[in-house]
Image (cartoon, grey):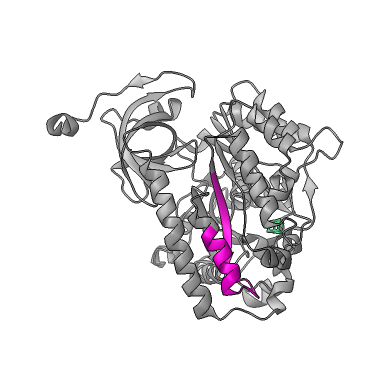
Amino acid sequence: MASIYIETFGCQMNEADSQYIADRAAAAGYVVVERAEDANVVVLNTCTVRDNAERRAYGRIGSFKPLKHADPALKLVVTGCLAEQDRDRMQRLAPHVDAVFGTAELAQLGDAILRWREEFAESAFSEERALIVPLGGAADCVTDAFSSVRGYVTVQRGCSYYCTFCIVPHVRGRFDHRPMVEVLNETRARVAQGAREIMLVGQTVNAYRDPAGEGDFGELCKQAARIPGLERLAFISPHPKDFTKEMLRELSEIPQLNPRLHLPMQSASDPILRRMNRKYTRAQFMERVEWIREYFPQAAITTDVIVGFPGETEQDFRATLDYIATGVFANAYMFIYSKRRGTPAAHWEQVDPAVASERFSRLADAQNTVTRSYHDRKIGTEVRALIQGISKKDRSKLAAKTLDNVTVIAPLPPDFDERLYAREPWLDIRVDGARVWGCSGSIVRRAERFANGGVTLEQPLINLLTA
Ligand code: SF4
């Protein structure tokens, strides 16, 4: 049987695209495998958002050279933002790559996978492949019992905001919103396949507008929530500027909306926000936070922060650090500024790397304290969480995500059966420990539907003995 291996770098947008590629491949009769060594087609879905993501992607492309040399029939495909950005250079930099598909060419990639399938129908791997040292890497889209529990649905591609640090508009183009009817149909299909939670994905998701004028992002969420069987709704990644008070009010009336909102701040200093071309001031950002607190009093707000942006002074940095230290964010994704070719900020005078790195440590310390205390507050409570699967770090544990997006791990229950837990994927977990990365606890019961009471679990014997 023809087989495909998919590896994804970067954001949820890429994850959604990889899900699409996997769906097309499965429909064409491929099996998605866990090791590149076992695949006829290897797809790398790349990211260029930071310099090290680009270097990692090139490193990874290079690591497939021995596999390609051992078996020239293998198709090595690069897609994602690096493919779009380096389309012309890719053949020179990585001549062993067979095909490059830009971010707007996923349908063509799906067609090519279908065409290649005939070539692999009867093929056997060359014996030289057996000599390949395991290539490592984390496979994506390998179907397990829990794959269909969450569904990603892309609502829009590209971005028209041109933040001065960001490569996205340059590689993915300007806004291209999908028709609302298409987004709703795909959501309906994912729910019918068993999705309990739908994540609407877009680079600037709340700027969504139906091309036929059928409504904005608030309207899209309202309509999605009316789909029978849709239990939970989440979205990533909104832009602070596009949250109006009215939109937040509308969203707060959707019972399935998860109580978590990502609000990428980047900096809390006005001069830096201006240089970043973020289109909001510190005061406007804080106003959005207040609106969220008004309409979603229990919501976890998370953010992104860039440290060491060109021109950032100690005073600018202090403004960000002091705001973070107030504890406003349940979690923050923090990065040291990284130059991206072709963006305005890459040409500006850069902050000394040692200074940027020292600021990053201070910021990370401040946020880690806040995040840990957010998680500490869950100790002793029962949380409802949607299963993710067996923990990759500890095979004796299950991993799940709470509605506010906190990872919780718990020992595998005595009756654990993948198919049973995929049918009843909501877990009530009693939290007894907290770390910066999330929480730990034990499973009390599982439920088929979010709103159901659930089936109480027998405690593992070890717990009875130690109780
Ligand atoms: S809003 Fe700014 S950071 Fe976000 S994708 Fe658009 S240009 Fe990039």
Dividing the image into 4 quarters, which one contains the C terminus? top left
Note whether 166 is above or below 119 in the view shown.
below
Q: In which quarter of the image is residue 174?
A: bottom right
Q: Which corner quadrant of the figure contains ligand 1?
A: bottom right
Which portion, as a residue range, is magenta? 301-322
* Residue 305 lies in quadrant: bottom right
Residue 234 seen by the camera:
no
Q: Where is residue 433 in the image (x, y as percent from the top left)?
A: 30, 43
- Decide which of 453, 67 is in the foreground and name it: 453
Q: Position of residue 427 (x, y in %)?
A: 39, 30
Q: Nearer the viewer, residue 63 or 224?
A: 224
Name the quadrant containing residue 369.
bottom left
On screen, residue 395 versus residue 177, left or right, reads left
Give whichever of 218, 62 is nearer the camera: 218
Label tally: 0
Q: Choose between 400 and 122: the one closer to the eye.
A: 400
Residue 99 in percent (x, y) is at: 67, 63
Residue 18 visible to an observer of this rendering: yes
